[in-house]
Amino acid sequence: MAAEMLNRGHVNNLVITNTDRTANRRLAQEAEKLGFDEDRIFITDLEVDSTLDEARAVLKFARQQGWSSFMVVTDPFHSFRTRVIFRRELRGSGVSISVRPVVGHWFRSSTWFFSRAGWNAVILEITKLFKYLLFHY
């Protein structure tokens, strides 16, 4: 999805949130294969373990770089919670985000309830959203 946005001229850079060295390297290599220049691929300083961590890492990165907007690409079932968390964490910072679900993903809003994987994804997302709202909102 990020490569598609690059090809359409909507983005110039790719920011990878720092999960672990192997995953970071694999994602960066894949991004290069899909058209991103090596010097346009960034990895956040803060190590992340959750969507909340990612929002905070992206905010810190944006401030360091002087950037004012981001497009967050994520799984369709994860896009609502991502939007809630990022908007709250970035509120008042001058950094805006748009959240784009990956196209062509197995999860579809019209059919998720027909599969066990769909139910698992939705229940987990609802649980995580309530946890965030209870403890961080």
Image (cartoon, grey):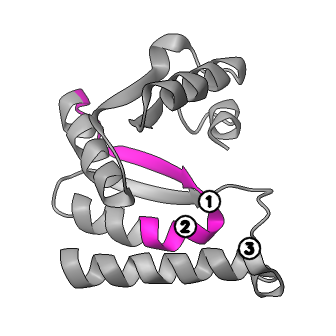
Mark 2–mark 1 distance (CA, rounded to whole Å): 5 Å
> Could you say where residue 65 lies in the image, as x and y percent from the top left?
25, 28
Give whichever of discs 2 and 3 has the lower sequence position. Answer: 2
Whether the residues at callouts 2 and 3 have beta carbons within 8 Å, the answer is no
- For disc 1, the neighbor class at 10 Å (few under 14, some 14 to 19, many from 20) is some
Amino acid at the residue labelled 3:
Ala
Which residue is at a point 53% across and 77% down the rendered structure image? 124
The reply, left or right, for residue 55 in relation to residue 109 is: left
- Judge whether residue 13 can be spotted in this image: no
- For disc 2, the neighbor class at 10 Å (few under 14, some 14 to 19, many from 20) is some
The reply, left or right, for residue 86 in relation to residue 39 is: left
Is residue 63 located in the magenta-colored stretch of the structure?
A: no
Q: Residue tagged by mark 3?
A: 117
Which range of residues does the magenta coloring cover?
65-82
Whether the residues at callouts 2 and 1 have beta carbons within 8 Å, the answer is yes
Quadrant in which the C terminus appears: bottom left
Q: Say which element carries label 2.
A: helix
Q: Residue tagged by mark 1?
A: 75
Q: Nearer the viewer, mark 2 or mark 3?
A: 3
- For disc 3, the neighbor class at 10 Å (few under 14, some 14 to 19, many from 20) is few
Quadrant in which the N terminus appears: top right
